[in-house]
Amino acid sequence: ERMPALLRAMPKAELHMHIEGSLEPEQMFAFAQRNRVPLAWPSAQAVREAYVFDNLQSFLDIYHAGTLVLKTEQDFYDMACAYLQRAQADNVTHAELFFDTQTHTGHGLSAETVVNGLHRACMDAPAQFGMTASLILCFLRHLSEAEAFECLEQVLPLGDKIVGIGLASSEVGHPPEKFARVFARAGQLGYRLVAHAGEEGPAAYIWSALDVLKVERIDHGVQAMTDAALMQRLAQDRIPLTVCPLSNLKLRVYPSLTQHSIGRMLEAGMVATINSDDPAYFGGYMNENFTQTFAALQLGSQQAYQLARNSFEASFIGAAERALQM
Ligand code: HPA
Ligand code: ZN
């Protein structure tokens, strides 16, 4: 068929993926072995079979268990390189990687270990994988404002190894407002700002991510479809939405991909993009997200072009680099 070939071949940017969510079960076992960390599962196959989720929290619990095998700077480097290689195979020419340090500092690692390993992989991406990559640090919203401030302090000495700040983890009950002051500080420091909003949480969280946190992009944002005024705001201000269809399916935000709103988002003139979120957990990398979504919603080449174009417009690549990529 022509459509899947076009979707696979077209250059695209990935703007919403958590690098810890790219850890494949086989690699999880390899790291567990080399770091002598016990795992709760007997085999990689058993890990895969455990990946059945009811909602965001049920995923976050198992995702957290997987991060326990990460111990050294080399682990973070190797994990990021494995992702970049898969992204290159999907014709991703630019990727912005989410990561969090709070998970790992909670296990006794330093923020520096995490950032240095990931950053070295990003630096090697052009030569090794023919693509560019950069890093966005996500605060964990189930933790306190004070802990987010502490996290920000820890990465300040690492300077421009991190291009942006985001907000992830359990959404409902942890509204953007909780992080108003630390986002204001991050903005003053020159970080680009994004936040997960409207994945499971209400449209009101998208409004406050925009108006209180002053983010430039919304991660997920699918609950905007319940609020016509918000849809109009997002379209008019060309606020990008980093949508993750297979994630939404696996976390039961939609009962089936045929119900997904991304087609309607594009029709409404919203700057939607397709991304993989946690590809090792949700059943696919970029091209799998594109091909399954296009098949379910019967989208065509016009939408493919729009989504690819949106991904570069929404990226934090510099204007000069962007002209080269498009
Ligand atoms: N939502 C919130 N937090 C996350 C996600 C997500 O989809 N993936 C990893 N952390
Ligand atoms: Zn996410």
Image (cartoon, rainbow, N blue to C red):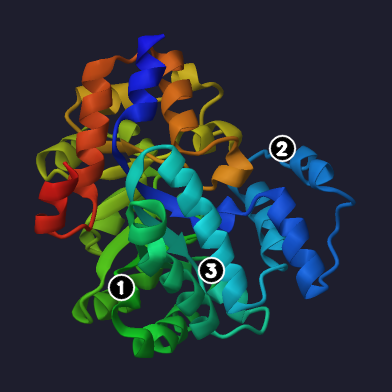
Task: Indicate the secondary structure of the residue bearing disc 1.
Answer: helix
To which residue does mark 2 refer? Answer: 52
Q: Residues within 10 Å of mark 3 (few under 14, many from 20)?
A: many
Q: CA distance from mark 1 to mark 2?
A: 33 Å
Residue 45 placement (x, y as % from top left): 81, 41
Q: What amino acid type is highlighted by mark number 2?
A: Val
Task: Indicate the secondary structure of the residue bearing disc 3.
Answer: helix
Tell me the tag on residue 77. Answer: 3
- Whether residue 173 sits left or right of residue 127 in the image: it is right
Residue 174 placement (x, y as % from top left): 48, 61
Q: Is residue 173 visible?
A: no
Mark earlier in primary sequence (2, 3): 2
Q: Residues within 10 Å of mark 1 (few under 14, many from 20)?
A: many
Image quadrant where residue 223 sits:
top left
Residue 192 placement (x, y as % from top left): 24, 66
Residue at 57% across / 77% down in the picture? 73
To which residue does mark 1 refer? Answer: 183
Residue 28 placement (x, y as % from top left): 72, 57
Mark earlier in primary sequence (1, 2): 2
* Location of the C terminus (image quadrant): top left
As displayed, is residue 128 above or below residue 302?
Answer: below
Q: What amino acid type is highlighted by mark number 1?
A: Phe
- Whether residue 110 sits left or right of residue 96 in the image: it is right
Label 2 or label 3, whichever lies nearer to me, is 3
Disc 3 under 8 Å from ligand 1? The reply is no
Residue at 25% across / 73% down in the picture? 191
